[in-house]
Image (cartoon, rainbow, N blue to C red):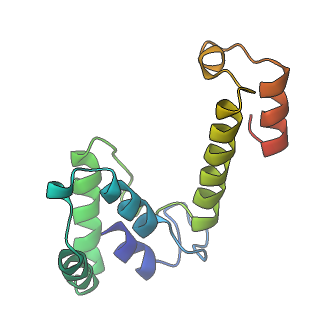
Amino acid sequence: MQDALDQRSSFRADGTLFDDPGAAMLLAMLAEKGIPPRLRLSELEWVHKQFQYEGMSKRNLLKLLFTAWRKVGCPRPRGYLSLNLQLVKEWFEDFGALRLEVEAGNLDLDAMVRGEFNEAALNFMDKRGLH
């Protein structure tokens, strides 16, 4: 549903140009892989929903999305568009690099959660542009 709105929109809610592809479909597919198989949509159901949303008026789509985001406990302003794909890609790259550093024993996540950052953690964050 969010992807259908993203594809029809030229501007974000704050008025800035929306010219990058949104990440809604990618995130929906990843979320789908994280739920039990019995709750997943079939390929036919995915296609059916996409056609359903594409045929819906933008006004109705906005109403449904506003309600759906509130229903799952993540209220968004009316007209909210998903994050751009490049930003989400960078996040996944950062998570992957973090995982590798933790597995190599270079980073202590427990210490970082407590707010204790050693030199290796600070170097990692500087290198990745994380603050």
Percent across and percent down for residue 14 are 54, 60
Which of the two residues, 127 or 98, is positioned nearer the viewer here? 98
Horizontal arrangement in the rendering, residue 4 relative to residue 57 (left or right): right
In the depicted structure, whether residue 127 falls above or below residue 21? above
Along the line of sight, the residue nearer the viewer: 90 or 11: 90
Say if 71 sits above or below 80 in the image.
above
Identity of the residue drawn at 18% across and 75% down: 45
Q: Nearer the viewer, residue 55 or 103?
A: 103
Q: Residue at x 66, y 53 (%)?
A: 93
Left or right: 10, with 98 as reference point: left
Task: Give how far across and how far down residue 110 sits, in percent.
Answer: 59, 16
Residue 55 in view of the camera:
yes
| Res. 81 visible in picture | no
Left or right relative to 13: residue 62: left
| Residue in the picture at 71% in, 32% down | 104
The image quadrant where one finds the C terminus is: top right
Which residue is at a point 35% across and 55% down the rendered structure image? 31
Report x, y in % for residue 22: 51, 69
Q: Position of residue 106 (x, y in %)?
A: 75, 27
Q: Give the side of residue 127 with respect to residue 25, left or right.
A: right
The image shows residue 86, relative to residue 60, as above or below, that is above
Residue in the foreground of this view, choosing between 114 and 98 = 98
Quarter of the image that includes the N terminus = bottom left
Q: Quadrant of residue 40?
A: bottom left
For the view shown, which residue lies furthest in the left direction?
38
How many numbered discs?
0
Quadrant of residue 64 in the image?
Answer: bottom left
